Image (cartoon, helix red, strand yellow):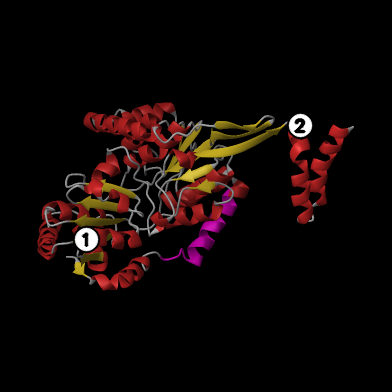
Amino acid sequence: MLQEIKKNNTSELLEYLESRNQEISSDILMKASQIIEKVRKEGDIACKSYTKQFDGIEIEHFRVSEQEIEQAISKCDPFFCESMNKAKENIVYFHQAQKQNSYLLQKEMGIYLGQRVLPLESVGIYVPGGRAQYPSSVLMNAIPAHVAGVKRIVMVTPPSKEGSIHPNIAYAAKIAGVTEIYKIGGAQAIAALAYGTQSIPHVDKIVGPGNIFVAASKKLVFGKVDIDMIAGPSEILVIADEKGKPEYIAADLLSQAEHDPMASAILLTTSTSLLEKVNEELKKQTDVLPKKDIIEQSLQNYGKAIVCDSIEECIQISNQIAPEHLELMIEDPMKYLSLVQNAGSVFMGYYTCESIGDYFGGTNHVLPTSGTARFSSALGVDSFIKKSSYLYYTKEAIENYGKYIVSMAQQEQLEAHANAAKVRMLDEKN
């Protein structure tokens, strides 16, 4: 059941939501730091030791062979494979449009400026293990990197008790463009990707979700490598008018509540009667879901609702919250889209459930959480490129403009900078 909050108490709601995002404790950071340092110094020896300690198995070779991959794939359900192939087509289609071109400008005769758009050389993707498997996350992380032109796309994932990888994960990796797979997880996997070991070459960037030790390790190695983000708990915000269907709204709120007791599910609506019907549906649908206990904790802690006077007011409050997933379950959602300033991804209309974006639609499901949609974006092709600028001045150009460069450098008391221009200007006069 959603707890109703008065619209003049939105600041209280924001504080309440922010309370979910606790800093990683110093104890966890210290333990992760110790693991990273040991892997940095000892390489494979440390990785094998930690794999035995944390995963309970001995690994001789971390890299998954092509034979192992094909054996795993042979166990996949054919319809699952078809579903993944269709999802891949949509994800590629969307991300191809994000590609940027290099450019060259001629400002005037003798002066050229340009920018090169270059893919990263290598990227590491962390894929969680355990009972839950998320092949969709493999697609969402690897495909944009592949579209960007990254040559090495390395996947790390904890081994099963039998020392194998899950068939669905193997299939997702194959169709998404992953070039190497290693059976290793936890902080030791992040350390291996950041610093490299005897058998696991280092990468330039690490992406993908993991447990608190993975998050802590990504935070610690940032600077040595780039990372995607430190993700917070899942969140969904639904804006609904009086025509919204209670069963749709409840189903969508529950789709995020089942993730985690810390997940938030918020409804902003212009209809008090709709809120009442949604609460009835939440009870009915929760009772038959397998993750009922998690859902009930999530809704009790972070299930909230606000009744507003207009859709514009709903969007104004939503912009303050900056949700990971925003649903505009309203008539003519395109009319209001321009008012949305802060949201990870927007799902429009009565029939566009958030699950479409999670799996199939093509937009990326790796999204900013915890209000960071105010200043950050979904994972995409931009996440896997770098930009390098360049300049070209002829002799005539440096002669014409060198005096300005000298003036600016001397004002900053950097005479050597000034002299670099001066020697070229003097050279012109000799």
Q: Position of residue 70 (x, y in %)?
A: 36, 27
Q: Position of residue 351 (x, y in %)?
A: 17, 44
Q: Position of residue 209 (x, y in %)?
A: 40, 49
Kind of residue sitting beneath label 2: Glu
* Residue 354 at least partly seen: no
Alpha carbon separation for disc pair 2 and 1? 65 Å
Q: Dot 1 corresponds to which residue?
A: 267
Q: Main secondary structure of the magenta part?
A: helix
Q: Is residue 417 left or right of residue 194?
A: right
Query: Which one is earlier in the sequence, the residue at label 2 or at label 1?
Result: 1
Q: Residue drawn at (44%, 29%), measured in percent from left and top?
A: 65
Q: What secondary structure is found at the residue carrying circle 2?
A: helix
| Residue range highlighted in magenta | 22-39
Q: Dot 2 corresponds to which residue?
A: 396
Q: Residue drawn at (25%, 29%), measured in percent from left and top?
A: 82
**Where 329 sits versus 299, above or below?**
above
